[in-house]
């Protein structure tokens, strides 16, 4: 398979970026998207040119670092998958593929396709930790939790913090990410102690960092590689409003 790649190139955060066009030929349909970029970079290095910078780590759909905006879709043309889980058979032979970094003011470009996603780390730090005892292992039934609550908490905890929700939202909102983090603890008794403080602190930090407001378009849920439900946003709103009423 042969492809034409239109890739965003940007020397650093202050430099002006732009698209550059590259050709890659004889790519197997079973090649992953990141492996295709590896092949491109190998060709560029042999030509004495600067390779394309892009993020990657586990390449198993776990870490979410492979954050690329491909043909207008966060992580590419697939549902419930990260960029590293996209294979070239998803594209037509001879297709032109546009590859960009995350589209979000809160995720400034570091170089080429690499962005700074430390804003999510700052939101998590604002949320803090739970203060329940963790130095001893209680019996499995010492703190009974209804299975539906446990399942919902684990579904929210599946969020990998890749940033696809904010990058695909027309407002650049991080509500789905914050909601998943709050919801994963709000459904468990261990998370209730600091629940009110956590919700207020994380929402405040999200606003401080310049993320936009949620207008419930559902784009975040559609592009989320872990298919986190926007129902968690409703829970975040309830947690936040309840905390404000307590004040």
Image (cartoon, rainbow, N blue to C red):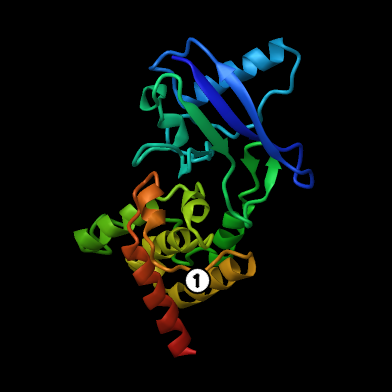
Q: Secondary structure at mark 1?
A: helix
Residue 153 appears at what percent x and percent y? Answer: 32, 59
Q: Residue at x 48, y 38 (%)?
A: 71
Residue 219 appears at what percent x and percent y? Answer: 40, 55
- Image quadrant holding the N terminus, namely top left
Task: Answer with the quarter of the image where residue 182 lies.
Answer: bottom left
Q: Decide which of 65, 37 is in the foreground and name it.
A: 37
Residue 223 appears at what percent x and percent y? Answer: 40, 48
Any part of residue 137 in sight: no
In the image, is residue 237 above or below residue 222? below
Q: Decide which of 214, 235 is in the foreground and name it.
A: 214
Q: Residue furthest right?
A: 14
Q: Residue at x 44, y 58 (%)?
A: 134
Q: Residue at x 38, y 38 (%)?
A: 81
Q: Decide which of 94, 210 is in the foreground and name it.
A: 94
- Mark 1 Cα shell of 10 Å, populated few (<14), some (14-19), many (≥20): many
Number of dots carrying numbers? 1
Q: Decide which of 204, 40 is in the foreground and name it.
A: 40
Task: Answer with the quarter of the image where residue 144 lies.
Answer: bottom left
In the image, is residue 160 above or below residue 205? above
Residue 69 appears at what percent x and percent y? Answer: 52, 41
Any part of residue 5 in sight: yes
Q: Residue at x 47, y 65 (%)?
A: 130
Q: Residue furthest left?
A: 147
Task: Answer with the quarter of the image where residue 231 lies.
Answer: bottom left
Q: Residue tagged by mark 1? A: 198
């Amino acid at each position: 398979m042969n492809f034409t790649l239109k890739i965003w190139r940007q020397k650093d955060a202050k430099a002006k970026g732009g698209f550059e066009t590259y050709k890659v030929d004889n790519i197997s349909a079973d090649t992953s998207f990141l492996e295709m970029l590896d092949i491109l970079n190998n060709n560029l290095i042999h030509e004495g040119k600067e390779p394309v910078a892009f993020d990657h780590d586990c390449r198993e759909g776990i870490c979410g670092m492979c954050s690329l905006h491909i043909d207008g879709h966060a992580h590419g043309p697939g549902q419930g998958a990260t960029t590293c889980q996209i294979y070239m058979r998803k594209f037509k032979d001879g297709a032109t593929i546009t590859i960009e970094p995350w589209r979000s003011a809160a995720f400034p470009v570091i170089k080429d396709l690499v962005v700074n996603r430390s804003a999510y780390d700052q939101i998590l730090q604002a949320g803090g930790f739970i203060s329940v005892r963790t130095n001893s292992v209680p019996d499995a039934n010492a703190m009974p939790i209804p299975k539906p609550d446990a399942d919902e908490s684990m579904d929210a905890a599946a969020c990998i913090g890749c940033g696809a929700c904010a990058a695909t939202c027309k407002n650049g909102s991080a509500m789905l990410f914050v909601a998943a983090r709050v919801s994963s603890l709000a459904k468990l008794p261990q998370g209730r102690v600091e629940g009110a403080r956590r919700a207020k602190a994380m929402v405040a930090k999200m606003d401080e960092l310049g993320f936009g407001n949620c207008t419930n378009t559902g784009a975040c849920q559609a592009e989320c590689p872990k298919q986190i439900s926007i129902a968690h946003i409703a829970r975040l709103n309830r947690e936040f409003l309840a905390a404000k009423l307590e004040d």
